[in-house]
Structure formats: structure tokens, C-alpha cells
Amino acid sequence: MPNIDWKNLGFAYIKTPYRYISDYKDGRWDEGRLSEDDKVVITECAGVLQYSQSVFEGLKAYRTKDGRIVTFRADLNAERMVNSAKKLEIPPFPAERFLEAVDMTVKANEDYVPPYGTGATLYIRPYVFGSNAVIGVKPADEYQFRLFVTPVGPYFKGGAVPITLRVCDLDRAAPHGTGNIKAGLNYAMSLQAIVEAHRLGFDENMYLDAAQRKYVEETGGANFIFVKEDGTIVTPLSDSILPSITRRSICYVAEHYLGLKVEHRPVPFEEVPTFAECGVCGTAAVISPVGAINDHGNIIKFPSGMDKPGKITQKLYETLCGIQYGEIEAPEGWIREIK
Ligand SMILES: *Cc1c(COP(=O)(O)O)cnc(C)c1O
């Protein structure tokens, strides 16, 4: 077993022994392999380095209460990566091979799957990039798919504390652009905004739709979940939002486990002050409760306050985590055991 203090693990890269690699050349993906070599060697003119032709995914492996190792809805990550790749003219890595690569790499690094009860998990990072020389603007001819894993600590040590957002004047994604795919280029776009938000004392940015600045989009890396006073869940609908698997799962759990109504529709920013609770969701944190949103000095405070998550946010968080850790029965097909 590696010598890791699981309970005090943060969210930083820790090298593990094995990663999965497959190369695309002459119009086909090769059979793939595990490797102990963490270094990527590519030409200085690689497509990814010049024109950012690259997409990625993020998911986790969990150690359940009864000691099994499982992934959560990994088929949706595989499918989403196919969609992301198509949009950047990258040959998709087949979904069933994606799942095999996850299983093989997690299994090979089994000792790095944190024990149940520590709140730590094994983060899985698949990605594809254009690897041959490209200088005139066009898609690469060769690609590499890689998948590494790294243990990460609980996102919130000592409980989820509500965060404060600010409404951002920069845009994350254009209408009809790449906002709905998981591409590093969207994150490069958001760095200036996030650095500025932190400098001003905010935790994250709330982006509004780029065309009209009228509707809520998402933060740089998490989707919004709002709760109405009557308990109805509302999540923004837009073509430039990344389809979060956590958000889709939370909506299912709200409806089928908690008996709540769910609305997936455009959410005007004007409506935000009427909500009782707010959270942002993604694989890393599940749900981060939002306590306040600063719109150019006009502060929206949610009734749930700045000390703890709102009641429904908390319930959704506990139910989803319970499913991931095998404490609550999962819907058919959500959990994939790695043997
Ligand atoms: C990955 C990501 C999310 C969260 O998606 P999950 O599937 O829930 O992890 C939200 N927004 C953006 C921009 C993302 O890249």
C-alpha cells in the first residue's frame, strides 16, 4: 500500500504506477496498453500544442462500504467524450474501449483507491490530443488517448461551507460554440476570469448567456441547481452549458428518490433572487452550496445562509454520495464494479 494520509489528501496530482495509452495512426486506434511511463513525448509542432486540439473527461472510482471498487455512470463520460471529440474533428475513442481503459487502469492502481470512509476517491482523467505536426490550420492525422488516475481528498474538509459567486463580465462560451463539450480550451478561456474573481475575494464566477446576458449559464466548471421555496428543482437549459453528469444524476435523484419536481429550462437571471437554495455541481465536489451571488455590488443572499447548505441541497448531496459509496441502492446501470 502507498504511504498516503488519505484523510488529509488535497486535490493535486500524485503520480500512480500505471496509465493507459492508445495511439491513433493511419485511420485507426491501436490495441492500447498500460504503461509505467508518465512522460508524453511529442513533436514541438503537435496539433495540441499549436491549435489546442484536445478534449478530456473527469470521473472517479469509489471504494464502497463493502470494499468493492466502483465507478459511477462511466458510460456517460465515454459517450460525452465521443461527442466532445467529434466537435473538434478528433476521431472518437470508442465508448466501450473507454470503459475498458477505465477498468484496466483503476485495477492496475488498485492500491491507490482510497479506503471507504475517508471521503477520498480515485480521480480518473481520460484525454485525447492531436499528436503529429500541424502548422497549417487543420485537424491532426495522429492522436493519443491517455488515461491516468490520481487519488484526491474530500473536496470539503469539515463539511460544505457555502461559497460566494460574482456575475462575470467575460464570457465562457459563445452561442453555437464549444461550451457544451469538455475541452481544455474552455478552461483556458476562463482563467483570467477566475484569477480576477479570487483576487476580488469571490470563490467562482457565474456566467450569463453571451448573446443577451439575460439567462444563467454555469460556473467555469460546474452546473447550477436552484431550489424553489416549494422544493422544486430548477436547472438552466442552454446549448452552451456542459451537460454535467452530476447535474443529470441529481435531477433523477430529486425526482425518483426524493419525490421533488424538476424543471430543466432557461433560467432568467432576474428569477435568481426568488430561489430558496442554490448550489453548483460537478464530479469534484458533488454539490457546492452557494450562499450569495454578487451582481456588480448588488448582492443576492439565499435564505439558506452562509453557514451551511440548504436543507434540500444537503439531502441531494447525501443521497447521491450514498449511491456512489454503495450505501443506497443505485438505479439500474449507474454503478460499474471493477473486479
Ligand atoms: C466537467 C464539467 C462540469 C461538471 O460535469 P460532471 O460530469 O458533473 O463532472 C460542469 N461544467 C463544465 C464546464 C465542465 O467541464
Image: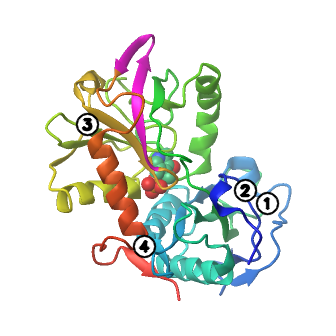
Cα gap from disc 3 to disc 1, whole angstroms: 42 Å
Seen from the viewer's position, the closer of residues 259 and 243 is 259
Residue plotted at (25% across, 31% down): 276
Residue plotted at (83% across, 74% down): 37
Q: Over which residues does the magenta segment extend?
A: 286-300
Marks 4 and 3, the one that precedes in the sequence? 4
Main SS category, magenta section: strand
Going by the numbered disc 1, the residue's amino acid type is Ala
Q: Which residue is mark 3?
A: 266
Going by the numbered disc 4, the residue's amino acid type is Asp
Residue 75 disc label: 4
Q: Which residue is mark 2?
A: 47
Q: Residues within 10 Å of mark 3 (few under 14, many from 20)?
A: some
Seen from the viewer's position, the closer of residues 3 and 168 is 3
Q: Which residue is mark 1?
A: 133
Cα gap from disc 4 to disc 3, whole angstroms: 27 Å
